[in-house]
Image (cartoon, helix red, strand yellow):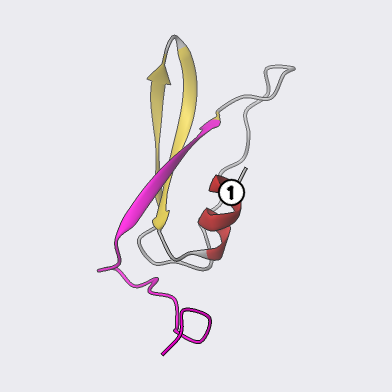
Amino acid sequence: MSNESRKPNVTYSAPIGSVDLLAFKEDGTPHEIWACPDCLPWHAEVVRVGGEFMVREWHAVDCALFQDLIKD
């Protein structure tokens, strides 16, 4: 079975990865956080990285949204 035809693993037991996103917009207003509709293991936490508050989103590594977030 090729990678293109395999079904993404987005279940609770899927391997997960994270991406750090700014917690606040440039004008200081917070970003809204919505649960990912595509993967079950999604969760988020607030972390401080180098004095900056970040939102760390965790997704299944096969999640399409996660792949979009890390491709840049």
Please tell me which residue is depicted at 58% across the width and 48% down the height of the picture.
Answer: 69
* Residue 54 sits above or below residue 8 on the image: above
In front here: 55 or 70?
70
Q: Quadrant of residue 46?
A: top left
Q: Quadrant of residue 39?
A: bottom left
The kind of secondary structure the magenta stretch mainly shows is loop
Name the residue beneath numbered marker 1.
71
Query: Callout 1 environment at 10 Å: few (<14), some (14 to 19), or many (20+)?
Result: few
Residue 9, percent from left and from top: 38, 74
Q: Quadrant of the C terminus?
A: top right
The residue stretch that appears in magenta: 1-21
Q: Quadrant of the N terminus?
A: bottom left
Please tell me which residue is depicted at 53% across the width and 81% down the height of the picture.
Answer: 4
Q: Any magenta on residue 4?
A: yes
Residue 37, percent from left and from top: 53, 66
Residue type at tag 1 = Lys
Residue 56, percent from left and from top: 43, 37
Q: Residue furthest right?
A: 27
Left or right of 60? Residue 34 is right
